[in-house]
Amino acid sequence: MSLEPSGVPEPFRAALVGLRGAIARPDRPGLDLQEVPAPKRLAPHAFAVSAEICRDDEPVASGRFVVLHDPAGQDGWRGDTRVVAFVSADVEAEMAADPALARVGWSWLTESLQGRGAGHTAAGGTVTRTVSCRFGQIEDADEASEVEVRASWTPLPEADGGLDLRAHLLAWTDLLCATAGLPPPGVLALRSR
């Protein structure tokens, strides 16, 4: 377990214990979570996690989950803690070309938060679909299609005033898995022969 610098407020310190527990025991196979250095200038206290999902030893999705904490709050947060999340995943070209992908990508986030009971407010973000064509020395490679979800939201405190950031991290991992095309928890994927 990482040592926290002095001056970290107790509610935030307690919330980090739950986060680190979830990182140590991801609830999805193929999901690799790592605590990484957090940005230092966005808030007095921060915590960050990176993630990667591989299929056949090739990365197909990655992301970053950052928790910012400012005991004084900040304009627009509507609270003293803000989650900033990013997910990027390879998708099939037909999927990237579908204009509905943006709305579907955003619904993956909102449904994940709701499904994990991660109460929140002031959510906002973007969903970007890209298709990259390669030229020159890498021209023989296939086109690359990708979806990116960038979002932020303010976690709501529990009834006891505590902050369950673990539920928010798990919702983010559900979003990451959905963008990678993995089935929801408890559902087995049918594999073609």
Image (cartoon, helix red, strand yellow):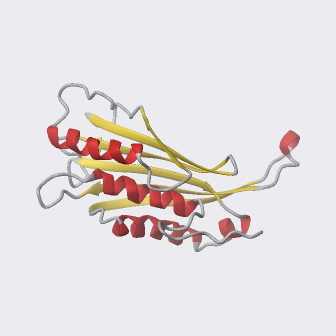
- Work out whether 124 lies above or below 57: below
Locate the C terminus and report the quarter of the image it occupies.
bottom right
Image height check: is 1 above or below 159? above
> Can residue 153 be seen by looking at this rendering?
no
Judging depth in this view, the residue of 113 and 3 nearest the camera is 3
The relative height of residue 173 versus residue 102 in the rendered view (above or below) is above
Rendered location of residue 185, percent (x, y): 47, 66
Quadrant hosting residue 19: top left
Asked whether, in this view, residue 169 is left or right of residue 50, the answer is: left
Location of the N terminus (image quadrant)? top left
* Residue, far left: 160
Q: Quadrant of residue 179?
A: bottom right
Residue drawn where x is 44% and y is 55% of the image: 27
Q: Position of residue 159 (x, y in %)?
A: 13, 61
Q: Residue 146: tell me if it is visible.
A: yes
Q: Nearer the viewer, residue 161 or 33?
A: 33
Q: Is residue 38 above or below residue 113?
A: above
State how many labels appear.
0
Residue at 25% over, 33% down: 44
**Image location (x, y in percent) of residue 91:** 66, 61
Residue appearing at x 67%, y 69% in the figure = 95
Residue 188 sits in quarter: bottom right
Q: Residue at x 51, y 53 (%)?
A: 87
At which x and y percent is residue 24?
Answer: 40, 43
